[in-house]
Amino acid sequence: MSDLIRVTIDGQETQVQRDTTILQAATDLGIQIPTLCHHPALEPYGACRLCTVEVIRDGWSRLVTSCNYPIRGEIEVVTASDKVVRGRRMIVELLWARCPETKVFQQLAAEYGIERPRFEPCEGELCYLCGLCIRVCDELVGARAISFVGRGVEREVATPFFQVSDACIACGACEFICPTGAIRVADVTDKEPRPLFLEFDMGLKGRGNIYVPFPQAVPNVPVIDREHCLYFQIGACKTCEHFCPADAIDYDQEDQVLDVDVGAIVVATGFDQFQPEIKPEYAYTEHRPQVLTGLEFERLASSSGPTSGTILINGKEPKEVVFIKCIGSRDEAIGNPWCSRVCCMYTAKQAHLIHDRIPDAHITVFYIDVRAFGKGFEEFYDRVREEGITYRRGNVSEIYRRHPGDERLVVRAEDTLLGQAVEVEADLVVLATGLTPRSDVEYMAGMLGLTRSRDGFFQEKQLELFPSDSEQEGIFLAGCCQGPKDVPDTVAHAKSAAASTIVTLSKLRRQRRPIPTSSRDREHEVSIEVEAHP
Amino acid sequence: MIVDTREFVESHHLLGCIQCGRCTAGCPVSLKTALNIRGIIYKTLVLDQVDITTWEELWDCTACRTCQIRCPKELDPCDVVIGLRTLLVGEGRHLPHTVRDALKSIAIRGNPLGYAMDDRAVWAEDLDFAVENIFDKGETDVLFYVGCSPAFDMRIQPITRALAKVFHNAGVDFAILGEDEPCCCNEARRMGEAEMFEDMVLVFKEEMLPEFGCRRMVTVSPHCFNAFKNEYDLPFPVQHYTEFLAELMADGRLSLGAQIPKRATFHDPCFLGKQNQVFDEPRQILTAIPGIELIELDRSRERSQCCEGGGGRMWAEGTNLEERLAVERVQQAVDVGAELLVTACPFCVMTLEDAVKISGFEDQIRVVELMELVAQAM
């Protein structure tokens, strides 16, 4: 094509479209040019001059900034000639002198062998006027809450009239993109930024608007949080598109409603963790993360969790740890009279984990009864006690901080075997939160015509002989949707549901073969409409 | 005093107890006295008889009801203590003489404080408007039930007058029971005088109620509020004054304009907060006062700590005088840097004020009834 222009970069020859920047062409060839003020999602700006390269055209050599130099004719580029490196070293030296405390320039200076700048350093300066914050706010967010004000040495990034900005939407893009930490959202607006938390890590870790829900997600691809994504909210940004090399971002993807004809349905919708806010005496709202739920601690201790398995509370290893059992279980006062069946053993496991990771931690478990009923469970309970974990009979009534500055919380309990009320100090309290029916259980029951037992979980046809059949023919129950279960019981229950399903399907097959897929004669079929939950 | 446990266990429905200990764990006095309500229940469950003659700690209970609120089996451990006190009071021998005197005073004078019945409306005489008597008036919107301490106690009377002033200024149609106002017997019941309480309910409902009409009752004390609201089964709603004032504020009939530039914290009275879930209204009123900066204690709302003034404890010293809970409470308020320790209960005001004096924080913190601040800010 006539538009293609021949370019030689560091001896490598290539052909590029007219107006491709030198930086782009070099990147495509795998040649790295250092940059500071460049961002692939933003228009080239040429503020920092670090990307300077040598361009030779018709025998004439000159230094240009590669990020905003459009290729319009045949040229030769040298990205790291002596002349270029000398220039860059000077640039780094000047930038470092401007922002002496910033890591990015300290590193660059080390790379270019500069021991100390020859110029007088500006003390306390962090901003080197690259304009990334202003450009991201303008080009991607569209808020234009900040701009450059002043001239020459007075030039700085600021809000209009130096007042908190109404235009700012507190998205945090400026703070995020700033390479030196010079700008904070709080400098721009008094609106509170609302950080997003990764649901799978129980909110112990932040996430972006586009994220992979959890490591084993099926399909294992990122999703966009439409509730918060700037594109879906105000039509701005679309930054992720610039970064995706596979061009896989599809903003127009819609939920699909599938109509599937099936011979049987297995309901395996699981459970919700008990919400400890319902019991305000445990001060979960006030003292999280010093008070955590069982699931939260599970994520915290997980090697794929928010801290890669290092157990840290407010940045410190907890040395006094208290576990409290039966939170939201066996509690008629809140309408949860059942035993959740898993908390005794997960507490034992989690206590063991802490002992394993923090050997000098002092761990106390407050319990009403220890129900170690499964195969090998009692032996594990024995092992955990042998490790030195203190089991105290009696339950906790309240958690508080004695004095405002105290690091540790006070757990108020009765040791019923001593017959004494006790106060135990704790760096971390783990609430052995129980299992409850899912919040959408009523919706599901209505959709499938299922009944619920008094505890709110789905009602099985008959507990002893048909534990995974529902009262609806062709609909089966597996796992905790029918009632609290541990993993072995869940697997057994699911296998029983699978076996019952096979019986139903083979009956259908005997009656008519093949399995009906047409819309006629659906006597034995169950038809469901899968749709987005309201 | 020997108690036959079988009957007692049955009448208090104690068989459901799993001995988890949450009652004792939550009990505000269990760390400082021998009172162990879980242990008492256990004894009644496993022994045929118990001798409660020497169980002095029964008089330590403040009837804050934390034990009942925390019980996962919906039992009422607090009522176990009250039930045992009732047996002692019925027998009449092994009870503190201060309790005996208070109960006697209610029987004779209609108040536990020893004041003359005829002086019950004296508090209203200093007001520059007349407070109407409901028996003269017949019909009214708000029956203002004053209560014993608010009517007689010199420390509390100004609070009562301030509330009457708010009613008057807001144009509330209200009246009082005057000299005929009986004691609500909330505290009497908790001191073990079940019979007197039941009699009083009968007298109030069958002899007094037919004489007048009202659309609601408003009380000064959370203790009276609790009795009338939950134990009298009245045909009209009962409100604590904080609830009523919050309504007036929302309707624009009460505005608080004067500055009180102080850091304040709020102590939730057990009978108002824990037992009746009135947490927000006092705070709404407090924060509506210009200049007030509300600092919450860690132990607030549902986790509030009892001041040790309820359940008849105004008339029973308890077995451990050394460690007053009110002193701990004042310390907590000082720790968060509050200059005002605000509460909304006559008993809390008195216990906390004593504690300020005992602990020597008089220069740092002042105990005030919310109503006093409202009066100042009006």
Image: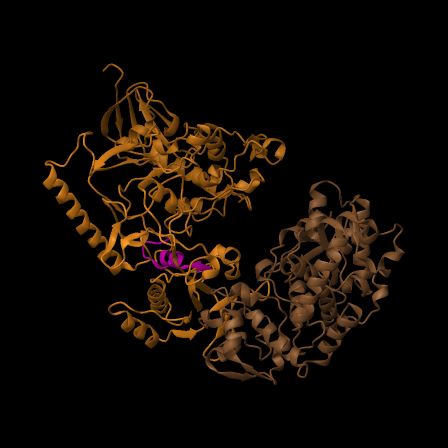
Supply the letter of whichever chain is brown: B
Q: Where is residue A272 in the image (x, y as percent from the top left)?
A: 38, 52
**Is there any visible trace of residue B120 in the rendered image?**
yes
Q: Does the magenta stretch include residue A294?
A: yes
Q: Where is residue A235 in the image (x, y as percent from the top left)?
A: 44, 27
Q: Does the magenta stretch include residue A63?
A: no
Quadrant (top left/top right/bottom left/bottom right) for the N terminus of chain A? top left
**Is there any visible trace of residue A407 in the rendered image?**
no
**At x 32% / y 47%, what residue is drawn?**
A214
Query: Horizontal placement of A378 versus B333: left or right?
Result: left
- Is B42 located above or below residue B283 in the figure? below
Q: Position of residue B367 (x, y in %)?
A: 74, 62
Query: Horizontal placement of A111 versus A262: left or right?
Result: right
| Image-quadrant location for residue B267 | bottom right
Residue at far top of view: A2
Query: Horizontal placement of A463 versus A508: left or right?
Result: right
| Image-quadrant location for residue B346 | bottom right
Supply the letter of whichever chain is orange: A
Q: Position of residue B102 (x, y in %)?
A: 74, 74
Colour logic: by chain
- Closer-to-camera residue (B205/A211): B205
- Closer-to-camera residue (B237/B278): B237
Region in magenta: A291-306
Quadrant (top left/top right/bottom left/bottom right) for the C terminus of chain A? top left
